[in-house]
Amino acid sequence: MVINLAGGVETRRKPEEFPIASSASPQTEDNMTCGRLLVLYLAAVLGPQPPLVDGHQKALETHKVSVGRFFILKCSPGHTNVTWKRGGSNSSLPAGVEVKDAELWFLPVVQAHDGKYICHNRKERVYEVRVSNELCPAAVESKRMKQGPLHCKLDLPRGTTRTAPVEWLKECVPVNLAGGNLEVTQKGDLRFLRDSETNAGLYTCLLHMSLGDNNYTAARSLNLTLGNTTFLYKPMLVYPKVETKEIVEIGSRKELRCKAYLGNRDDGTNMYWTINGHHFNTSPHLHYSQKYAEEDGAVYGMSSLVISSVVPELLDIPISCHLLNPAGQGQGTFRLHKADHRGLYVCVLAPLTVCLLGLALALGMLFRMELVLAYRRLKRLFISLEVSDGMLYDAYVSYQYSGEGHSSEVVTFALKVLPEVLEKRHGFSLFIRGRDDSPGEALHDVIAEAVSKSRRLVLILSGQETLKHHPPTPAHHNWPTSTAWACTMP
């Protein structure tokens, strides 16, 4: 015989396990029965008893409720002859707490309702009610993911009418039913359509009802935990997120890389490549690889496609990286484009051209006179001297080269200075008498013809000849020895 003193429960062995002789007398059997009864009595008396609180047993249940909510305490089911009282020195029930059908109704909960309540039906049962000012009560149940939907476990009391469907909150905020991951069943259960670590948290269900002319809301909270749950995620591309353009040279080597977020574990996501929508076999010119890596607790899949030599057939067609697992699929696309160096040429030549133009302008400003003379000399070499006005000379130079008024200074000025300055430096074409006329020609004819083909007439007079015709004045004292006068022929 084995006695469980901790629980006060006897565990009997089967009759055949006791080696009682068949020849035992009835008196012996009566003595053994009395012994068993004595042991059982001692176990019940000496065994551990539930501790007392305020002269009563310790609370069997603890309920966490919020101020303003409807709440019911239920005693032993199936019994109607039940009495309720409050624990402590004042056993009367507080205002707002009523007994209905052997149940204790809080209409609604207020802070003064915090404490212990005792129901008596043959024996006492103690309940503890903890009242908080939080909108959502503390969790009374903890549940791990992948254990089915969340049950509200709030029944509509008799005599009340439901005024709205069961409402669910997460962290005291209404759940987002439009997100496609949650739905509330007709029974008021919250069901998750797919597993996600974001599902974990504190959930509260609200039951809205009316009693007479008053509306009430009952609330119950439970905590959903991850535990050791792992999740299968739809693969999400990190790169490339959009169609990506890659610049290549024909014949060059190119490596295309694809990266995807796979969740918190290596779930065997398949990563493969297609060219223009078609699968291809690995060859010396095309080779792809795949590997997994962990970064900050998350798993990423990486795949590379190596093109050893780019051929024209690979240009401007979709080259796609595909992701596939039971949770979903993804795709990223590359396009190869031939390098266009025209832009590079423009970028290089444009600044160079600007620099050259600036340098040319600076040189032109510095050597503008030399450039003008050079232009005129070149013009005389390559362009006919006869222009649209029919003139051959820019000027006819006339001076006194013999007879009265003859001066060596005038001759020097006419034959050396003027040609040196006007012809050699400035490119003018001069007809100088005594230099350009030929001996033996009729003098008057030569002069008339030269003057008629000249744009201007230059007369060189000596200083003595000028003073002869013009009396000296203070201004005349500063005149040079030789003076050139030019007038335009009408």
Image (cartoon, rainbow, N blue to C red):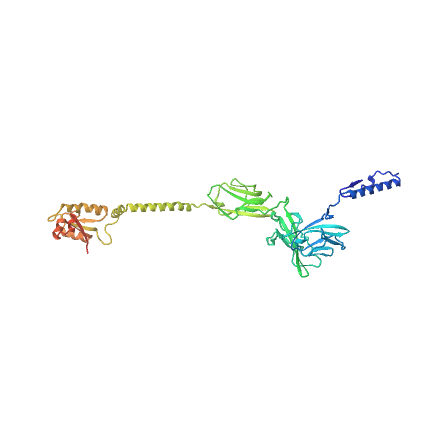
**Does residue 454 appear in the picture of this structure?**
no
**Does residue 167 appear in the picture of this structure?**
yes
Percent from the top left, x then y, of residue 88? 71, 50
In this view, the residue farthest toward the bottom is 213
In this view, the residue farthest toward the left is 404
Specify the quadrant that holds the N terminus.
top right
Left/right of residue 124 with respect to residue 417 in the rendered view: right
Seen from the viewer's position, the closer of residues 44 and 480 is: 44
Indicate whether 113 appears above or below 258: below
**Total of numbered circles in the picture?**
0
Left/right of residue 390 with respect to residue 258 in the rendered view: left
In this view, the residue farthest toward the front is 89
Specify the quadrant that holds the C terminus.
bottom left
Percent from the top left, x then y, of residue 385? 23, 50
Left/right of residue 121 with respect to residue 228 in the rendered view: right
Seen from the viewer's position, the closer of residues 126 and 242 is: 126
Percent from the top left, x then y, of residue 25? 89, 39
Q: Quadrant of residue 210?
A: bottom right
Residue under the point 17% across and 46% down: 413
